[in-house]
Amino acid sequence: MTSVPLVSVFSADDSTKVTAKHIPLPAVFQTPIRPDIVSFVHTNIAKNRRQAHAVNPQAGMQHSAESWGTGRAVARIPRVSGSGTHRSGQAAFGNQCRKGRMSLPIKVWRRWHRRVNIKQKRHAAATAVAATGIVPLVLARGHRISQVPQIPLVVEDKIESYEKTTDALNFLKRFGAFEDVQKVVSTKVVRAGISKQRGKKYRVRKGPLVVYFNENAKLLKAFRNVPGVEVVNVTRLNLLQLAPGGQLGRFVIWTQSAFAHLDKLFGTYRYASVLKDGYQLLRPLLTNPDLARIINSNQVQEKVQPAKTTKVLHEVQKKNPLKNTKAMDRLNPYAKKQRAAATAAIKANTKGTKKIKKNKALKKASRAAFNKVSAALNDATKAAVQEEQDIKVKYFSVQKGAAQAE
Amino acid sequence: MQIDEVVWQVINRGHCSFKIKTISQNFCRNEYNVTGLCSKQSCPLANSQYATIKEEKGLCYLYVKTAERAQKPKELWEKILLSKNYEQALAQIDEQLKYWSNFMIHKNKQRLTKLRQMLIRIRKMRLKGFKELIPIKKKAERRDKIREQKALVAANLENAIEQELIDRLKNGVYNEIMNYNTKAFEKVVGQNQVEDEEEREQQEQEEEEEDYSDEELIFDPNDLEEDDEEDQEEDDDEDDKRLFKKQTFNQLRRDDDELKDVKKKKPRVKLQYEEEEEVEDRKKQQIAF
């Protein structure tokens, strides 16, 4: 970006009033967006809060079990020694056994924490901050910011002296941030799984993050009880809060002094950071990431060679020329004319022959003749049928007579 | 423009809260999406220059978003009311989105058409009325049906009707000649025989009815008045009437034995009482010893 975008600072009491106009955006907000760095750093940093736990080292092993060896028609797994109980002779020790110890039991000396290079951590934090200034990313993360007057939202330092939660709530309502809080409230769910018995009963969404600067600020207590809202000092910006779940674009509310402090924290592209010793903001690979625009720009198009047309060696699918006229025409251009000539010839040959007109008289005569013939046929068939019946009757009567006689 | 590419990469590859993935297609839940599908061209987040049509209370509005207002979510969408005339609305879209990409213009026009069709259908349905489908709630239906049956049984309709008719009969509603069921008639009579002395009048009224034979059972309200004088009649009269009843309604009446027993029972009780007293006295005498 050539021109530095400007930001307005809003009055805490009135969201329409602007106390300071056109403050330049700190350079952090122009850091290239690197979701890969953020993702990597987040997954590792998230492990640092873990507490060591382990399985009882003796679990499943408190037997003097020994394998019976071969020749006893049982599997070779160690079996519980002794007698007089169900348990004796049962399999033990193996991870596959009932009441056996787990495979690779968890040890306390598991490597719980991960160290990440400081530079990476700083780059991740810078990117996360930059992402908080991009509206689509904040929206995509799921925050309800459609009524917020400006992103990044910078408010005068007055809010740092808020003591009452009502003040905090009213402030959020004024700046359209309350919708996000409402989302948090309405989507509070009882957690699935055992953790609810371990102190994590509810799954609560993340709402706005309020960033302040002065250490004496009382707003921590004011915002503490508002669901979803987190409060943090600029000097202690946490990636786990800026990009919860490794997802860029938390909705952040900055106080004026906190906002101003960002330049000192992260430095600019001109000057290295003051507070992060020797840290220089990440430089982008492409100053203009809009590839499509670059490619279609005049400067590039001028130099570009004309597109090569691919030479078609053969059809994708072979068409039979004997059946497919177009394929035939491609091979033999004269085929078209030949066909035309053939059809013309056929037509010429058939020119002399008259079309048989339907002669009504002829029709009548023919019909009469037909009727005559069919009548004769009918009579004949009738006669035949009758004859057959007579024979049948005679036959059966003869039979009857014969039967009667008998 | 600059950020769009980056945003699309992040959203598409990463997570977008508006994206809905199905087996065949990806959809976009964002309310400003023109097509409803998830693609780079139609993503309202990944395009700083975007336009949609939205419908509000039967009117279509063109919502336009430009890069200039990208940092101000509240003022992001410019709302332009489109003409109610379809062709004029299309012309408006052309005018507002002049020099925009063909895709955007085309999709907006398509969306406008679709919304207008929907509105037409809504209006038609409102005028013509439509069949509202109400689901049948099996459980509720089953429950109500059974309760209806129970209520029917509990209501004792027949009894209620019977009582009503009897009351009417008593009140003299049916002054004309009526042919009625002898069994029912007897029931009415039977009821009255068990009643208290207080309602003797009614009793005797019905007793009057007894006197009539099977064939001609005529109820004459005038006859009722005659019996008022006979208030203090004793059991004797009742006995006579019972006998009479026996003779006339032989087939239908209860067992003769029952009535005989009823007669006998009364004196028996007295005797027993006396016996008990005697016994007690004897006992007392014994104790004295």
Image (cartoon, coloured by chain):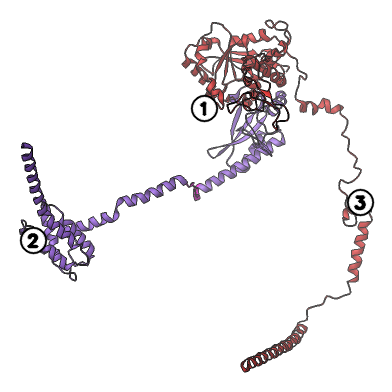
Residue at disc 2, secondary structure: helix
Circles 1 and 3: CB distance less than 8 Å? no
Residue A296 figure quarter = top right
Mark 2 — residue? B237
Work out whether A197 lies above or below B90.
above
Same chain check for tags 1 and 3: yes
The amino acid type, in three-letter code, at marker 1 is: Ser
Identify the disc placed on residue A330.
Answer: 3
The amino acid type, in three-letter code, at marker 2 is: Asp
Residue at disc 3, secondary structure: helix
Work out whether B24 lies above or below A161.
below
Query: Would residue A203 be seen by someone viewing this image from the given angle?
Result: no
Chain in red colour: A
Instruction: Give coordinates of residue A367: x percent, y percent.
Output: 74, 84
Query: Would residue A366 be seen by someone viewing this image from the given angle?
Result: yes
Mark 1 — residue? A186
Chain in purple colour: B
